[in-house]
Image (spheres, helix red, strand yellow):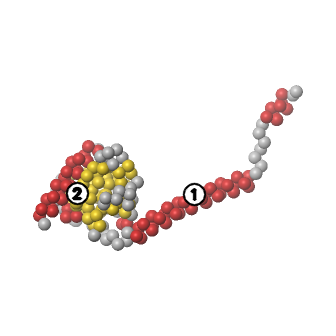
Amino acid sequence: MNPAWTAAQQQSAEVTDWAARIAWLAGLLLFVALLYWLMRQGWKWRGALQSDLPALHRAPGALGEPKLTMTGRYHGSTTAGQWLDRIVAHGLGTRSRVELTLTDEGLNVVRPGAADFFVPATALRGARLDKGIAGKVLAEGGLLVVTWEHGDRLIDSGFRSDRAAEHIAWAEAITTLHNTTEGAR
């Protein structure tokens, strides 16, 4: 037997059905595009359902002396007590970097690439350490969750500091500020 002839026989046959492969690939791409479009429509639908949420407050001109500052991540907001009911209206569902400043006037939330907002001290309802909020689950106590009132709705907003050891001080300071402003009413 000729060794060149046996080596040629062992090679696999060339792919000749390019049309079927291209059709499968095109079908897969259309399916993925449809999934992304449906997710986008769901996000817009959720925003329309939450359109009764008033516009977010902007920080006043003079914030006063900062009690605490923090840099980290903003992981989103949900209806208070319902950690999977994400709020997307007014950009509250957009995850981003965050710079938090707590003053006697309230909590200033600065988010590069997303809408900034301000929570007045009278709207703060407390803070706690938790393990999750819609779209993000961490170790127990890995998330600072601030509860605040906006319009007629209680909202939980989740933050994670670049230095997680700061969470306890933040939870205590926000709760103290709430108790102080509640007692002044």
Q: Earlier in the sequence, mark 1 or mark 2?
A: 1
Circle 2 packing at 10 Å, graded few (<14), some (14-19), many (20+), is some
Q: Are marks 1 and 2 in contact (CB under 8 Å)?
A: no
Where the N terminus falls, by quadrant? top right
Horizontal and vertical percent position of residue 183: 12, 62
Say which element carries label 1.
Answer: helix
Residue 98 seen in the current view: no
Disc marking residue 126 = 2
**Residue found at the far front of this picture:** 81
Disc number for residue 32: 1
User: Mark 1 belongs to which amino acid?
Assistant: Val
In this image, 91 relative to 105: left or right?
Answer: right
Pick the residue in front: 34 or 130.
130
Q: Which image quarter: residue 147?
A: bottom left
Query: Which residue is more in the foreground, 61 or 142?
Result: 142
Label 1 – label 2 distance at C-alpha: 42 Å
> In terms of depth relative to the viewer, which is nearer, 40 or 105?
40
